[in-house]
Image: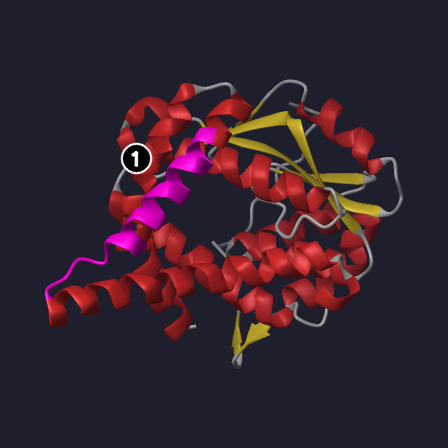
């Protein structure tokens, strides 16, 4: 297609350097980032561009869905997880113009803003080593630190392939957890300049899972040492899970979200230990 220029790099240098090479060769006012396993709806650009007409907006992301949702029980849960991440977390953050991570499958950036940030983006080091993960979150944090707003457009739909087995899913979640912890540390100075809700949101995202893990460990210790089941804690977790899923099912008008309660088992027994491991091996 003559409208596209394809850049072939001499070797696989990773997503970040590939992005930078493309951005430096670009000429348009906007840069659209799309992951290679993603299919965009035909009207995505028409939906995203109006948000970018405000010069204060540096980036905007669309809504993600699982392209292979019907592959397995896990992909169905991940599809619902994406809906929640977009229409609860990102939508709430967008009310304050500060989406904390514009996801790679579908994100549009102002090229002039990107150009001013590329050197920082390219030379990111953590504990003396060049960073090779968490590109989307770090680039979004750089946008916010530069004073730009970041937005979410729910009507711009992108369908991306998600892991259909637990092993690849947990490896993906480990990368994302490390990225979240690392860039939260780097963005701590940014938080006081943002809305108080965003500070609470970021603290909750990082401390909440650790406190829940502590509750689970305390319950298991009680069971092992005293032989009594911590019914109150268990019932509290069940009640909060069912209330949350019921509210989401009502908001989305889709009964399938009641089934997202099954994700609680993955969260408690797999993701919580994984997040603790991510923090310890940061």
Residue at 58% in and 44% down: 89
Q: Is residue 160 magenta?
A: no
Q: Is residue 244 magenta?
A: yes
Residue at 46% in and 19% down: 254
Residue 214 against residue 28 in the figure, above or below: below
- Expressed as whole percent of the image width and height from the top left, the position of residue 244 reads 46, 38
Crowd tier of the residue under label 1, counting other residues whose Cα lies within 10 Å: few below 14, some 14–19, many 20 or above: some
Task: Please say whether residue 74 is visible from this viewpoint.
Answer: yes
Nearer to the camera, 7 or 67: 67
Task: Please say whether residue 105 is visible from this viewpoint.
Answer: no
Instruction: Report the number of numbered marks.
Output: 1
- Expressed as whole percent of the image width and height from the top left, the position of residue 210 reads 41, 65
- Expressed as whole percent of the image width and height from the top left, the position of residue 3 reads 71, 26
- Expressed as whole percent of the image width and height from the top left, the position of residue 170 reads 32, 51
Nearer to the camera, 174 or 272: 272
- What residue sits right under mark 1 in the picture? 74
Q: Quadrant of residue 258 in the image?
A: top left
Quadrant containing the C terminus is bottom left
Residue at 17% in and 57% down: 229
Quadrant containing the N terminus is top right
Relative to 159, is 28 on the left or the right? Answer: right
Magenta-tinted stretch: 227-246
Which residue is outermost to the bottom?
Answer: 128
Residue at 55% in and 50% down: 9
The residue tagged with tag 1: helix, strand or loop?
helix
> What is the image's colouring?
secondary structure
* Secondary structure mostly taken by the magenta-highlighted segment of the chain: helix
């Amino acid at each position: 297609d003559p409208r596209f220029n394809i850049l072939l790099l001499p070797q696989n240098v990773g997503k970040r350097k590939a992005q930078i090479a493309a951005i430096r060769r670009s000429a348009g006012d906007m840069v659209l980032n799309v992951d290679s396993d993603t299919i965009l709806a035909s009207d995505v650009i028409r939906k995203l561009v109006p948000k970018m007409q405000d010069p204060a907006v540096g980036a905007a992301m669309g809504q993600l869905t699982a392209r292979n949702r019907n592959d397995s029980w896990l992909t169905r849960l991940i599809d619902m997880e994406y809906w929640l991440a977009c229409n609860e977390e990102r939508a709430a953050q967008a009310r304050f113009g500060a989406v904390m991570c514009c996801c790679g499958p579908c994100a549009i950036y102002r090229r002039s803003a990107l150009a001013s940030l590329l050197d920082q983006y390219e030379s990111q080091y953590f504990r003396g080593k060049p960073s090779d993960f968490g590109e989307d979150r770090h680039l979004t944090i750089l946008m916010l630190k530069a004073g730009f707003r970041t937005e979410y457009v729910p009507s711009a739909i992108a369908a991306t392939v998600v892991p259909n087995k637990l092993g690849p899913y947990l490896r993906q979640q480990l990368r994302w957890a490390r990225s979240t912890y690392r860039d939260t540390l780097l963005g701590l100075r940014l938080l006081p300049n943002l809305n108080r809700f965003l500070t609470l949101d970021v603290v909750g995202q990082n401390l909440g899972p650790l406190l829940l893990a502590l509750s689970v460990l305390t319950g298991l210790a009680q069971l092992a040492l005293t032989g009594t089941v911590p019914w109150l804690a268990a019932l509290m977790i069940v009640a909060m899970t069912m209330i949350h899923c019921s509210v989401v099912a009502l908001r989305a008008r889709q009964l399938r979200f009641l089934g997202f309660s099954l994700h609680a088992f993955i969260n408690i027994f797999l993701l919580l230990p994984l997040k603790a491991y991510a923090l310890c091996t940061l």
